Structure formats: C-alpha cells, structure tokens
Image (cartoon, rainbow, N blue to C red):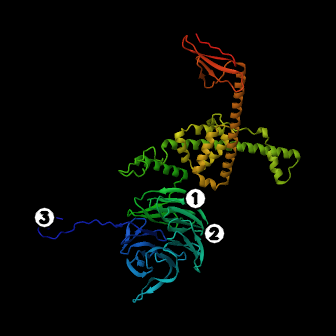
C-alpha cells in the first residue's frame, strides 16, 4: 500500500494476500474416510476436509460448533453433530448443506456408524440415544441425494457422552455422565450389561474387532479393559495425567490408542495390559484421534489447532527401552524445572515455609537409574547361568533314567526307541558347563547380593523403585536365596518388604509371587529365631565364664556403686549371700586410690606407691 496515495484520498489496493487453510480455533473432532484418503476435522465455526497424502485442505464448510462427525458410506458426504443439537449433512462435491435436522434437544456428544453401513447412532445431553437410517431424497428437479430418517431411540437415566456398536452388530455400548456404561442388544434394544468402575464420567469407549473387549476412558484418568461376554473388568490402568478424551482399537488386534488432556498419545497392549509407547508432539490438549482401516495410519487433533498424521514403520519397539526413556524424560524435567513444591505458608500466620528436607522425593536421580541397570544386568547374567545348569541337570537326569530303564529291560514301543538313543549318552560323559567368569567364583545369590550391597543405602530405595515389575519379581526370588545361603537376613527382609510395598497390586494377583512371599516369611522368621537362640547361648556362656572367673580370682569384672565410711574407707556391697566384699582406701602417697578385694569380715587399707 502506498501511504502517500492513501493520505491523498485514493483507495488502497491489495497487492498480495496470505491465506492459511488451517483452523483458527482448537480442533475438536477428527475422522478418517473409509479408504484413508481424506480427513474431516471440526472446530468452533468451520469443518474442514483434508487430503492425507498432500496435507492440503480441499474443502471448508461453514458449519456449527462441531463436537463430532463422520464420513458417510462412499466418502462423498459428511455428517456433523453440533453443540446446539443439530445434525448437519453436507455434500462434499458441491460444498453445500443437504439436510439440517434438530436431532437432540441438547449437544450431540457422539455419533458412531453401524458396521453394516445402513445408518448410525447418536447420543446427546438430552439423555437419549437415537438410531438413524439413510434414505434417498429426490429434489424437484429429479436429482437424488442422501437423507436421514429417525428409526428408534432409547431413553437413558443421564446424559449420553459416547456410543459404540460392536463389529458383530450384536450390542451397542453407551457411556454416560453417571460414570457407568450400559450395553444393550442392538436388534431389540433390551438391556444386557451394566459396567461399573469409573469414578468420573465416561468420555470415550471402543470395542475390539472380534467383539470380545471393550475399552473405556474417563475423566478419572483411567483406561479400563472390560470383557464383553460377562462384563468383568480385566484391568484398570492409570492412562494419563488428565482426562482420557479418546480411545480407539487397531483393526483385527487388541492394540489400542488413547489420547488425553495431558498432551500425550499412548499406545497400549490390551492383552498384556502394558503401555507400549508414548507419542508426544502436541502442545495442547489432544481432543480426538482416528485409526485407519488397515491399522497402519493414525491421525490426531489437538487444541493447539494442529493435525498430526502418524504412520506405522518397520522399526522395532522395545517396551523396556520405552519405559526407561519415559523415566529419563521425567528425571530431566525434574532437573530442569525442579520437583513440585507444596503451598507456602500464609504471610502473618506464624508458620514457616516447608523446607527442602521436609519435601517428599518425587523421583530418582541418574545414579539410582544406573544402579538399577547394573542390578538388572546382574540378574540377567544369573538367569542365564541358572538356565545352563538346569539344562545340564536335566540332561544328566534323563541319561540316568534311560540307563536304569535299559538295565531293567523297559525298552518297548516308541518310548523304548528314544530310551535306546539316550542310553548311548552316558551320565559321566555329560560335561559340566564352564563357570561364568563374570560371577568371579560366586554363587548366583552371592553375586546378586554383592551388587545389591554395592548400591549406597541412600540410592538403594530409588534403584528398587526404578526396577520394572519383571525384575522386581526376579529379585524377590533371589531374596529367598539370600536367606538360604545366610548372606544377610536384614538386607534380604528389607528388600523384600520394600518391593512388596511398591508392587502390592501386581503381587496380590500372582500366585507364584505370593508363594515366594510366604516362603520368605517362614525363612526369615526361622533365621531370626535361630539368631536369637545363638545370642541367648552366647549370653549364657558369658555369664558362666564370668562366674567361674569371679570364683577363682580376687577381682571382679564389674563393680557396684560404692559408699565411703568415716575413716575414708570406701566400702562396696558384695554379692547377696556371697563371701566376697570390695573396699577402697584413698592413700596419701601419690594420691592414687587402691582397690582391694578380700573375704567378708576383714578390713584392709592399702595405698599405691
């Protein structure tokens, strides 16, 4: 713009313009087309359609405040559920609205398509779940287009926040504001199951492709895995540091993605109930995500007004490395920003601010992590060594049995054929495995105990906290070996108690570890009882030696309080009923007292020269 011409009254002329096709506000919902070629996103005033490969916006629709949406079969139309309760149907080729229906009296929180592609279900704040079907609408000119018609509905007891059809089209699950999940039969809409467990409203749910598992996330930050056959909760996981906003299963697997207000996307294994990896790229709350039809594509939408496309790669993912990386990131954040402090005292209240020493430790340092890694490496070395010796013992036992059976003539049938082959290997021909030089001649229990004692007491508890549950269970087994080899009762019991306190929930669900804890309890009590008896025997022996020494010598090991008489002689009482007394006289020569022991009835004074 030429300012001189503008000031003289001439009109300003635009030379160039910069247009951004992105959202001006946070992206609330994201959906993928059936062929994974297009993405639909909704925000406050607009709905946009994007090309996945090029990343360009191909359509912008002036819609209402879209809280949810989806592509219709054929990917030529999109449906949007708005905050005002309207269902808006748009034609993508013409970028125009076809139909606008007031579907709910309140906000339309969620819509989910039927797997037979004949319609969809919607849930809203008016406490209803409505079922819609597609119909053909013909205009006055004779052109046909897609329309919506209401087929049936269910009245619920509270606001409906999410709905989901099972892939086998037997059930429909409804998550509600009262923190419960209701499951109905899809054909008759009769009640089937009620899932209780969430402490706050259920914000999202999804059903696996085989219709056996249902995953739900809520405002209580938990991810719960349920069985759809009996409605039992398989596992409850602390998923995010804030509300869980979306959960999606990968097709034909039990892997699933979750996103939350903590800006993170997490990948889970619903069979092993463990976190596989974390995707941290968004800078604000992640509101929604969608998974491709082949499972190799995932898209996410955030309040930072960005969309992110994630593709599956051939790179291997190791769960332990991901867990270690997550822990290191937490430690780095604490080192950079410090541990969170508690509230300071109110000025004028007379209370002092909490000191650093009074604050609870919020994590572990790098030295503790290194100690935990050394401990895990030691346990892995010991496990390999024990495996080698077990294979040796099994082979030797097998050869002995085969040799005995051959002597007794029990070599009939197919078993006899294998026994004849085993007889060819004599027990004495089987060589013992060579000792592992890393163990340095120590037994497995001694080697791990040395590594454990090598960790400073200050870092030992943090190192045990950093141990994954797998290695914590291995260390509990080795604590039994510490007691069996009498390496250290105190260290073994302290380690076992600490690990049991940290992993109480996991241990209570493992019968093997419960048996190990019971064995440790019995062994530790036996060792403590034995040490108590040993100490008692030693004390009794010392008393006998003391009595024998006092009966033969003229001097006690220990004396009793003394009192002085008028002559300067210090008298002390002897044993009750005994024959020995103790006296002291203060001499004038040299000023040193002299201790004299003599029989009762005699009085002597003596000074040291």
Q: Residues within 10 Å of mark 1 (few under 14, many from 20)?
A: some
User: Which numbered disc flags the more N-terminal residue, 2 or 1?
Assistant: 2
Q: Residue furthest bottom?
A: 140
Residue 307 x %, y %: 41, 64
Q: Nearer the viewer, residue 381 or 292?
A: 381
Q: Nearer the viewer, residue 357 or 187?
A: 357
Q: CA distance from mark 2 to mark 1?
A: 19 Å
User: Which numbered disc flags the more N-terminal residue, 1 or 3?
Assistant: 3
Residue 219 x %, y %: 48, 64
Check disc 1 and report the residue beneath it.
273
Q: Residue at x 44, y 68 (%)?
A: 30
Residue 4: assigned label:
3
Check disc 2 and report the residue beneath it.
230
Q: Nearer the viewer, residue 339 or 596?
A: 596
Q: Residue at x 58, y 76 (%)?
A: 184
Residue 212 x %, y %: 61, 68
Q: CA distance from mark 2 to mark 3?
A: 79 Å
Image height of 254 relative to 34, above or below: above
């Amino acid at each position: 713009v030429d300012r001189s011409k503008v000031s003289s009254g001439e009109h300003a002329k635009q030379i160039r313009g910069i247009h951004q096709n992105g959202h001006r506000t946070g992206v609330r919902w994201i959906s993928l087309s059936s062929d994974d070629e297009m993405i639909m996103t909704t925000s406050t005033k607009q709905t946009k359609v994007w090309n996945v490969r090029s990343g360009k916006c191909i359509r912008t629709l002036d819609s209402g405040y879209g809280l949810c949406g989806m592509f219709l079969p054929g990917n030529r139309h999109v449906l949007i559920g708005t905050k005002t309760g309207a269902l808006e149907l748009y034609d993508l080729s013409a970028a125009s609205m076809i139909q606008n229906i007031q579907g709910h009296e309140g906000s339309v929180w969620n819509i989910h398509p039927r797997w037979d592609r004949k319609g969809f279900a919607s849930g809203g704040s008016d406490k209803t779940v409505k079922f819609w079907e597609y119909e053909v609408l013909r205009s006055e000119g004779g052109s046909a287009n897609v329309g919506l018609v209401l087929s049936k509905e269910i009245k619920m007891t509270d606001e409906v926040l999410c709905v989901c059809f099972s892939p086998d089209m037997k059930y429909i699950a409804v998550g509600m504001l009262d923190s419960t999940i209701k499951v109905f039969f899809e054909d008759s809409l009769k009640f089937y199951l009620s899932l209780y467990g969430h402490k706050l409203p259920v914000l999202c749910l999804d059903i696996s492709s085989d219709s056996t598992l249902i995953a739900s996330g809520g405002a209580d930050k938990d991810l719960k895995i349920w069985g759809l056959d009996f409605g039992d909760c398989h596992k409850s996981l602390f998923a995010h540091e804030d509300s869980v906003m979306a959960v999606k299963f990968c097709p034909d697997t039990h892997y699933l993605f979750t996103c939350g207000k903590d800006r993170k996307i997490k990948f889970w294994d619903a069979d092993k109930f463990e976190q596989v990896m974390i995707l941290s790229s968004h800078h604000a709350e992640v509101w929604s995500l969608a998974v491709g039809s082949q499972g190799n594509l995932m898209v996410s939408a955030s309040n930072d007004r960005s969309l992110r496309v994630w593709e599956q790669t051939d790179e291997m993912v190791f769960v332990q490395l991901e867990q270690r990386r997550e822990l290191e990131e937490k430690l780095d954040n604490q080192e950079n920003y410090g541990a969170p402090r508690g509230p300071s005292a109110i000025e004028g209240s007379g209370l002092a601010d909490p000191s650093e020493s009074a604050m609870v430790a919020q994590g572990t340092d790098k030295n503790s992590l290194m100690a935990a890694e050394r401990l895990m490496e030691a346990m892995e070395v010991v496990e390999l060594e024990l495996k080698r010796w077990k294979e040796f013992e099994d082979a030797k036992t097998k050869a002995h049995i085969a040799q005995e059976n051959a002597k007794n003539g029990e070599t009939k049938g197919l078993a006899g054929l294998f026994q004849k082959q085993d007889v060819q290997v004599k027990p004495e021909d089987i060589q013992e495995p060579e000792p592992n030089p890393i163990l340095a001649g120590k037994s497995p229990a001694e080697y791990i105990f040395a590594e454990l004692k090598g960790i400073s007491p200050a870092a030992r508890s943090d190192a045990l906290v950093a141990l994954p549950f797998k290695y914590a269970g291995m260390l509990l087994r080795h604590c039994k070996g510490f007691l069996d080899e009498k390496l250290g009762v105190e260290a073994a019991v302290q380690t076992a108690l600490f690990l049991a306190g940290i992993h109480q929930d996991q241990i209570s669900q493992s019968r093997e570890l419960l048996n190990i804890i019971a064995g440790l309890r019995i062994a530790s009590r036996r060792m403590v009882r034995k040490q108590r008896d040993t100490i008692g025997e030693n004390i009794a022996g010392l008393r006998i030696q003391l009595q024998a020494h006092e009966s033969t010598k003229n001097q006690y090991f220990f004396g009793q309080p003394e009192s002085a008489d008028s002559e300067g002689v210090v008298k002390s009482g002897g044993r009750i009923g005994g024959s020995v007394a103790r006296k002291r006289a203060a001499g004038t020569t040299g000023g040193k007292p002299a201790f004299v022991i003599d029989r009762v009835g005699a009085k002597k004074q003596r000074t040291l020269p």
